[in-house]
Image (tube, coloured by chain):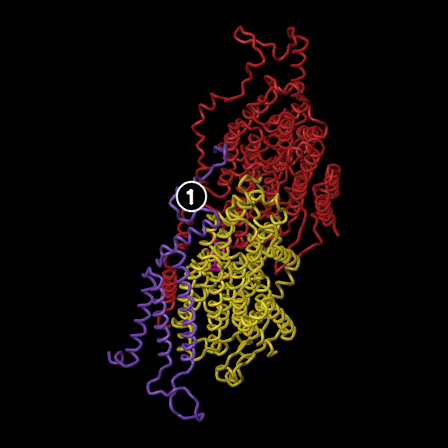
């Protein structure tokens, strides 16, 4: 029994435990404890993240001649620890008051708890996969577990989008299966190493097919272009903490598999060898990533529902991760990998703030909120930290990873990709400003005057996550050893790091310095503002006037509808729904064929079909064999 | 051309023609009873072909008299097969006839096409859906609300 | 061992005496059938043990092969006999008050047993026809008149199919002079030309009418749409498989050639794609299940096209799985209302039935770790090992079908989990015996999930044994015919 076996046993026992007690009140106390327990198990395995050997499971299965085994590398550990922290935060968040409200609103709280642990279980299973078959099984588990989480919301739209998701997910799974079959057919083996062996033996077109199939499978999970349509609505409609969890980590399983399979076993050489000299696979993937950073981000800008806005950003940020890792150098891949953790931390925190606002006000519609900063200051603080992270500004962790990605793009001579990434960041900044402005700033609505800060059971995980966002931004060296081990284990160049950041020949980064200077600047500003500035007077929110008129509380001066009209006027024509059109056309083509077959089945004289069948079969035989044979 | 005008040749020709007439009837008839008759012709033709396949000129009936008479026998197996097929065929035809009566009573029609559409409609009504191929406009593809990408 | 003839004789006998018995006591008539089937089950079990890993032939009528009537008994045929007995027991018409219906069911089982055990084409044809007659009768016996019309339309295409079957048999006889399958297996070289293979095509398509093969399955939606669900479970679950058994016997013993495989592969693919496409548009449960059933029979043909023992074990696995799943789904549908919209709120009304339904369709879709996944995995891997354009195409078709299937199945599932509204009547019966059996099927499915490895091993053994023409020949034919072969 290795530590990995213990981990599996613990996770499975937790699954059983929660499924047994899920409808009892004790689940509120038990679930966080259990996630803590799993986290401790992971911490016991931490050596793997500091250059130690991978853990192998002593379990293995031999079914129908297919062998399956499991292992935990630095890569698995890195994703697992993010998963568990996100799960722990979500579990704490939903236990207590939020859960009570959810139950009173008719939600099935026990199922939500169960869905969370099922998700954690399936992700651990996927992360621990040691060969292609266990990878596939874990992959399907993760898909169905997310589906379970998504359908829990009673709304019709949620169920519809969950079905849409599962169709996409199945498409991905089937693409993965074809890829696995292609690999298996060559050497009758499902070991990971076979990928590179088989890839080297394949003809050019098979290589293209294999890479594309693998990429499609993983890209669907990640929500990369052009498979991004399912994700945002599905995540946004998932019940509160579930959305936080899914948004934080679920779709990153696609990133995990990309690193595990494409980066590790096909590698830069493999990608570059596929395609023409003008556009090889690396270029293609890089541009997919770049477009993914731009398009979903600008769709997010258009949203007026806070959860959807965040969910669309979740899609867009996936692009940075891929963009970083696809550069295959030390800083780029470090940036891409690090962005997974960073994104998980601030995305979960941001979702939680939105859910907290919904908890108190009952809406996440940005046109119906405003001015909540006075009522919910701590939630505001969390959201502020979160959006700074999301926008990729110092001193939060999002800056570090994005800086690494930018740096890598420039160093690798990819100015166009760099511009695309910056364009994405621009959209992010604009839309996160919209988010925080419409929620917390401006005028408080009359109906929200009695809104209070959310209870501690919800605040603690939010604050905890924002501490992570800040600390890992201030001292990225806490995370970088893990990244370095991941790079080492998947065969990428290893990044040189220290507590404050990285050492790099063409210009390193020390976040302690950056943050120090930033805070120094803030300090000076504050000094000037408070001690040298003019007099200030504190007035009530409604004590206002505009154009010489006093405004009463029923006149809205808080500007939230139709945000960024000028910008929208400029880029509005670009929102054409082309991908939605593409999806609909596929459905239409399918309908066409389906009607065709339906009419065959409605034959007036069934014997005609018999005769046609016989004649065609005989003709085919005749052509194949000839009479004389 | 000589071998065509042998007894077998003519018999084969007749049998195959019978089959084809039957098949043609099955394809083009609308009336249930005619369909049934066409089926009968089709089967009869096929049976004849079968019997002929075991037919030997000047052969004797395949009955063992003294064990080893030396004379060439007609092949008994196709005959047995055809006998069975005829018996079964008659049974099926009788059943079909009774079904035709009941169908006629219920639908008031012997036209296969009418019956098919009425049947389709009945199935759909039982299931509470619109029948397939009804002339209403296809359901519009529904977008998920609020999507614009 | 020769007592196994009773398998076929007892139900046949019962079919004739039931109307007589019913004159005296209708209760007794009702119970005659189940008793006979139970006896048969016992016979099958004892034979299963006795036959072990070997095979046994029973010669009837006083002639030795290749002339006489032969029953071939091995685990494959016994497996199917067991399935027939259990399945007919499950759908036995307890609430029908008509003794003739019991007779017809007995006739149906007799024919089915015969079909499973016979080892010559002549008998296979006879039993196939008997089965057809019994089926028309049972369908037409249903109280609604649309069933009569559906049955009539079924009869036309099925009879035409039988003529094709007969023609195929005639061609084989003309070419070889024998109808004993073992004897045929010794002279395959005569049959691998155009004439022989066209005989196979005629047989496959003729029997394919019952096996829901692609172009000749237009009856499926009509018949399943008009008859009771239990009967659909029987037809889709079992009778269709028996027709496949006929095709399997011909394919494995006589026609192990690429052209035959290709034929099955093509009709299989067309069946899969057309079935799923139409099922996708279906708006009610039965229509959806009917076309999904067509699609799964298509998968079965694709599996058969792998050929040899690999193809056979996959085919057996698919048949068993499909029997459990589709049989279970049809049995469940007994309680469900037709249109999908009426099923709203089912999950709140009866969480158990929603859960059972989910288990079935998840296995149907091949979601790990349910048995369906392993079958799909093994099938796809085996297809890939064969290589070649058509086989790759088949992989694509199967996986595309899975995606379509997910789309429509889960559309239905999400409807079930929606809130009930005014006109939703998810369950039209409070209790139904079929539902109990459906739950049993689901349980079996879950249990077999744990025993995937031993079960597959067992099936592989059975297939290895049954797909081997040499064993077949040596068991059936007397030694002197073996000498003739060379």
What segment is highlighted magenta in the picture? Answer: C386-398
In the picture, one chain is red; tell me its letter: A
Q: Chain of mark 1?
A: A
B57 is higher (above) or lower (below) than A251: below
In the picture, one chain is yellow; tell me its letter: C
Q: Give the prevailing secondary structure in the magenta stretch.
A: helix
The picture places residue A470, in percent across and down from the top left corner, at: 67, 28
Residue lying furthest left in this view?
A: B1
**Quadrant assignment, res A263:** top right
Which sits in the foreground, A503 or C129?
C129
**Residue on which disc 1 sits:** A588
**Residue in the picture at 44% in, 24% down:** A570
Q: Is residue C91 visible?
A: yes
The picture places residue A515, in percent across and down from the top left corner, at: 66, 24
The picture places residue C24, in percent across and down from the top left corner, at: 58, 71
In the picture, one chain is purple; tell me its letter: B
């Amino acid at each position: 029994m290795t530590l990995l076996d213990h981990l599996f046993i613990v996770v499975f026992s937790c699954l059983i435990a929660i499924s047994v007690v899920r409808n009892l009140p004790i689940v509120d106390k038990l679930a966080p404890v259990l996630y803590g327990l799993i986290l401790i198990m992971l911490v016991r395995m931490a050596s793997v993240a500091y250059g130690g050997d991978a853990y192998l499971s002593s379990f293995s299965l031999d079914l129908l001649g297919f062998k399956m085994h499991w292992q935990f590398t630095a890569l698995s550990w890195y994703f697992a620890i993010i998963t568990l922290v996100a799960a722990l935060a979500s579990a704490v968040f939903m236990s207590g008051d939020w859960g009570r409200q959810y139950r009173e609103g008719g939600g099935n709280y026990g199922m939500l708890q169960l869905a969370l642990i099922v998700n954690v279980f399936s992700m651990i299973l996927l992360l621990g996969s040691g060969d292609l078959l266990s990878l596939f099984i874990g992959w399907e588990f993760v898909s169905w577990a997310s589906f379970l989480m998504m359908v829990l919301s009673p709304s019709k739209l949620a169920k519809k989008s969950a079905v849409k998701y599962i169709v996409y997910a199945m498409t991905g799974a089937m693409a993965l299966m074809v890829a696995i079959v292609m690999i298996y057919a060559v050497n009758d083996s499902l070991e990971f190493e076979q990928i590179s062996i088989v890839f080297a033996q394949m003809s050019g077109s098979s290589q293209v097919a294999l890479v594309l199939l693998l990429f499609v499978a993983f890209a669907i999970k990640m929500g990369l272009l052009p498979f991004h349509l399912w994700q945002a609505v599905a995540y946004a409609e998932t019940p509160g903490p579930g959305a936080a969890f899914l948004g934080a980590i679920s779709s990153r399983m696609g990133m995990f598999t990309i690193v595990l399979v494409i980066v590790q076993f096909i590698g830069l050489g493999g990608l570059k060898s596929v395609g023409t000299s003008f556009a090889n696979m690396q270029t293609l993937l890089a541009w997919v990533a770049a477009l993914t950073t731009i398009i979903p981000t600008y769709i997010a800008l258009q949203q007026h529902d806070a959860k959807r806005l965040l969910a669309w950003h979740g899609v867009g940020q996936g692009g940075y991760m891929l963009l970083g890792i696809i550069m295959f150098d030390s800083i780029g891949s470090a940036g891409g990998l690090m962005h997974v953790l960073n994104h998980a931390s601030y995305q979960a925190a941001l979702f939680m703030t939105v859910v907290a606002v919904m908890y108190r006000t009952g809406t996440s519609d940005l046109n119906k909120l405003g001015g909540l900063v006075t009522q919910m200051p701590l939630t505001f603080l969390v959201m502020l930290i979160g959006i700074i992270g999301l926008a990729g500004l110092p001193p939060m962790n999002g800056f570090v990873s994005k800086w690494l990605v930018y740096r890598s793009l420039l160093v690798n001579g990819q100015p166009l990709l760099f511009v695309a990434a910056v364009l994405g960041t621009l959209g992010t900044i604009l839309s996160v400003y919209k988010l925080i402005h419409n929620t917390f700033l401006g005028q408080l609505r009359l109906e929200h005057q009695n809104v209070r800060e959310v209870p501690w059971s919800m605040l603690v995980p939010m604050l905890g996550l924002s501490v992570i966002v800040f600390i890992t931004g201030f001292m990225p060296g806490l995370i970088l050893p893990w990244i370095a081990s991941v790079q080492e284990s998947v065969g990428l160049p290893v990044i040189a790091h220290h507590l404050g950041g990285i050492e790099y020949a063409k210009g390193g980064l020390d976040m302690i310095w950056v943050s120090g200077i930033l805070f120094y600047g803030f300090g000076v500003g504050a000094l000037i503002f408070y001690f040298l500035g003019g007099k200030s007077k504190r007035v009530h929110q409604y004590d206002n006037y505009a154009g010489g008129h006093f405004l009463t509380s029923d006149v809205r001066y808080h500007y939230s509808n139709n945000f960024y009209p000028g910008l929208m006027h400029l880029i509005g024509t670009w929102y054409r729904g082309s991908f939605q059109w593409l999806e609909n056309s596929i459905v239409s083509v399918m309908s066409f064929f389906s009607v065709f077959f339906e009419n065959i089945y409605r034959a007036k004289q069934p014997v005609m079909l018999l005769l046609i069948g016989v004649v065609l079969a005989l003709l085919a035989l005749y052509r194949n064999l000839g009479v004389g044979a | 051309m000589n071998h065509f005008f042998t007894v077998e040749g003519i018999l084969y020709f007749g049998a195959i023609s019978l089959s084809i007439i039957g098949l043609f009837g099955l394809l083009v008839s609308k009336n249930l009873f005619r369909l049934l008759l066409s089926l009968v012709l089709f089967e009869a033709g096929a049976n004849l072909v079968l019997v002929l396949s075991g037919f030997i000129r000047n052969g004797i009936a395949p009955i063992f008299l003294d064990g080893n008479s030396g004379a060439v026998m007609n092949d008994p197996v196709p005959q047995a097969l055809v006998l069975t097929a005829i018996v079964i065929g008659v049974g099926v035809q009788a059943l079909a006839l009774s079904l035709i009566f009941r169908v006629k009573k219920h639908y008031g029609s012997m036209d296969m096409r009418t019956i098919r559409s009425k049947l389709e409609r009945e199935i759909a009504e039982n299931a509470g859906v619109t029948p397939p191929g009804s002339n209403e406009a296809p359901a519009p593809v529904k977008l998920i609300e609020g999507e614009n990408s | 061992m020769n007592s196994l003839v009773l398998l076929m004789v007892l139900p046949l006998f019962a079919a004739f005496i039931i109307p007589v018995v019913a004159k005296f006591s209708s209760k007794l008539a009702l119970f005659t059938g189940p008793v006979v089937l139970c006896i048969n089950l016992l016979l099958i079990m004892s034979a299963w043990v006795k036959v072990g890993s070997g095979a046994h032939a029973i010669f009837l009528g006083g002639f030795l092969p290749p002339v006489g009537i032969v029953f071939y008994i091995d685990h494959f045929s016994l497996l199917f006999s067991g399935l027939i007995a259990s399945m007919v027991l499950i759908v036995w018409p307890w609430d029908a008050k008509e003794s003739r219906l019991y007779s017809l069911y007995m006739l149906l089982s007799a024919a089915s047993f015969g079909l499973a055990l016979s080892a010559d084409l002549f008998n296979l044809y006879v039993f196939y026809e008997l089965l057809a007659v019994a089926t028309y009768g049972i369908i037409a016996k249903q109280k609604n008149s649309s069933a009569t019309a559906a049955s009539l339309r079924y009869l036309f295409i099925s009879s035409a199919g039988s003529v094709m079957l007969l023609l195929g048999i005639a061609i084989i006889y003309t070419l070889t002079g024998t109808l004993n399958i073992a004897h045929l297996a010794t002279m395959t070289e005569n049959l691998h030309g155009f004439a022989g293979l066209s005989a196979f095509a005629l047989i496959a398509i003729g029997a394919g009418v019952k096996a829901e093969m692609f172009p000749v399955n237009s009856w499926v939606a009509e018949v399943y749409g008009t008859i009771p669900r239990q009967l659909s479970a029987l037809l889709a679950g079992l009778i269709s498989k028996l027709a496949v058994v006929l095709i399997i016997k011909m394919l494995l013993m006589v026609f192990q050639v690429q052209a035959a495989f290709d034929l099955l592969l093509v009709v299989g693919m067309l069946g899969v794609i057309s079935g799923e496409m139409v099922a996708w548009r279906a708006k009610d449960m039965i229509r959806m299940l009917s076309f999904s059933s067509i699609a799964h029979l298509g998968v079965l043909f694709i599996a058969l096209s792998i050929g040899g023992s690999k193809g056979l074990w996959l085919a057996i696995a698919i048949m068993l799985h499909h029997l459990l799943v589709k049989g279970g789904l049809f049995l469940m549908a007994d309680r469900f209302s037709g249109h999908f919209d009426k099923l709203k709120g089912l999950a709140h009304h009866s969480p158990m039935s929603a859960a059972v339904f989910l288990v079935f369709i998840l296995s149907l879709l091949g979601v790990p770790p349910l048995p369906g996944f392993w079958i799909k995995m093994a099938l796809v891997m085996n297809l890939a090992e064969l290589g070649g354009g058509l086989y790759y195409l088949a992989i694509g078709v199967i996986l595309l079908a899975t995606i379509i299937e997910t789309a429509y199945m889960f559309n239905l599932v999400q409807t079930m989990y929606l809130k009930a509204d005014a006109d939703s009547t998810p369950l039209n019966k409070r209790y139904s015996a079929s539902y109990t059996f459906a739950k049993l099927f689901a349980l079996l499915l879950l249990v077999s999930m744990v025993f995937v490895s031993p079960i597959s091993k067992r099936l592989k053994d059975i297939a290895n044994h049954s797909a081997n023409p040499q064993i077949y020949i040596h068991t059936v034919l007397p030694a002197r015919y073996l000498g003739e072969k060379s």
